[in-house]
Amino acid sequence: MAEAHAKNHDYHIIDPSPWPFTASVGALLMALGGVGWMQGLKGNEFGLLGIPLNNAWLFVVGLAVVLYTMFGWWSDTIKEGREGHHTRVVSLHLRYGMIMFIASEVMFFVAWFWAFFDASLFPGEVVQVARTEYTGGQWPPAGIEVLDPWHLPLYNTVILLLSGTTVTWAHHALLHNDRKGLVSGLVFTVALGVLFSFVQAYEYMHAPFAFADSIYGATFYMATGFHGFHVFIGTIFLLVCLIRAMKGDFTPKQHFGFEAAAWYWHFVDVVWLFLFATIYVWASAGATIATGH
């Protein structure tokens, strides 16, 4: 009888899980709460079934549900890996999933680069409304002082490039079963990620233009701000890997959690290089550089 039920394939049939449902509920609450919150910031009324939603509470509740779902779902995935369910086929499919996720992130950033280049390459084009009204017929728009690309942005470029080398060091250490090198590499990578975020926050606080000042400010903050958010998420991702590594998780043959974090971090690095080369360096050519920034 036991032989009749023996597993003779490399696939893993998971147990019934509540996480897809809770994730959907959390996402719905975040969407409704986000709309209501933004409407409230504009002074508008927004509600559903007579319940006022023009505040941040529903969004916060939805975010809490999503974060709890992420913790529970990924904890289950880690447990399944420890129990030996991540076979060769399952591991391959996990990698495919991460690759598709990063591809979707690439297209997300393509949208912001598209917006930036559409405004910067054709500043005098007449569309539904005169674009010259927003740009002054030039890029950067008339009256805008830009950040010096060879100051804080260059520092952050060096920081991210260094973090790319330290996470690679950690990866190679893991492949050679060097636990000390793995932990050290992750510590340096997390520290560099935190340093990057602090430098960018300082840059934002001292930037000579605001989000609502011009289309330059809008495209600048949307592109660099979302990248900064991805650095924050990647830092947490690597911090979790560091905690797991210190607990003895990951082996040279089974370490997809760390590998996914490393892929994500390298993606963040590459996006920053494009941001630095275009939004900071190329867009500042011939522009007025703000002194002291």
Image: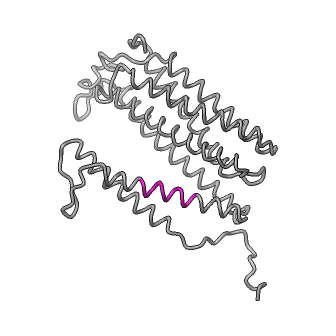
Which quadrant does the C terminus fall into?
top left
Figure disc tally: 0
Q: Tell me where residue 225 sits by quadrant.
A: top left
- The magenta span reads 64-74
The residue sitting at 23% across, 50% down in the picture is 54
- On whether residue 139 falls in the magenta region, the answer is no
Residue at image point 35% right, 27% down:
217
Residue ID at (47%, 39%): 229
> Farthest residue in the top direction?
291
Q: In terms of image quadrants, where is residue 62?
A: bottom left
Task: Pick whichever, 177 or 127, lies toward us.
Answer: 177
Residue 92, image x and y in percent?
A: 68, 58
Q: Is residue 72 left or right of residue 177?
A: left
**Viewer-side residue, 19 vs 140:** 19
Q: Main secondary structure of the magenta part?
A: helix
Residue 204 % position (x, y): 41, 26
Foreground: 57 or 258? 57
Q: Residue furthest front?
A: 247
Q: Quadrant of the N terminus?
A: bottom right
Residue 91 in picture, x, y percent from top left: 69, 58
Residue drawn where x is 40% and y is 57% of the image: 27
Q: Residue furthest right?
A: 176
Residue 239 rendering spot, x and y as whole percentages: 60, 43
Image height check: is 215 above or below 231?
above
151 lies above or below 167? above
Residue 56 vertical position relative to residue 156 in the rendered view, above or below:
below
Tell which of 163 and 11 is nearer to you: 163
Task: Classify residue 74 as left or right of residue 86.
Answer: left
- Asked which colour scheme the image uses, the reply is one colour
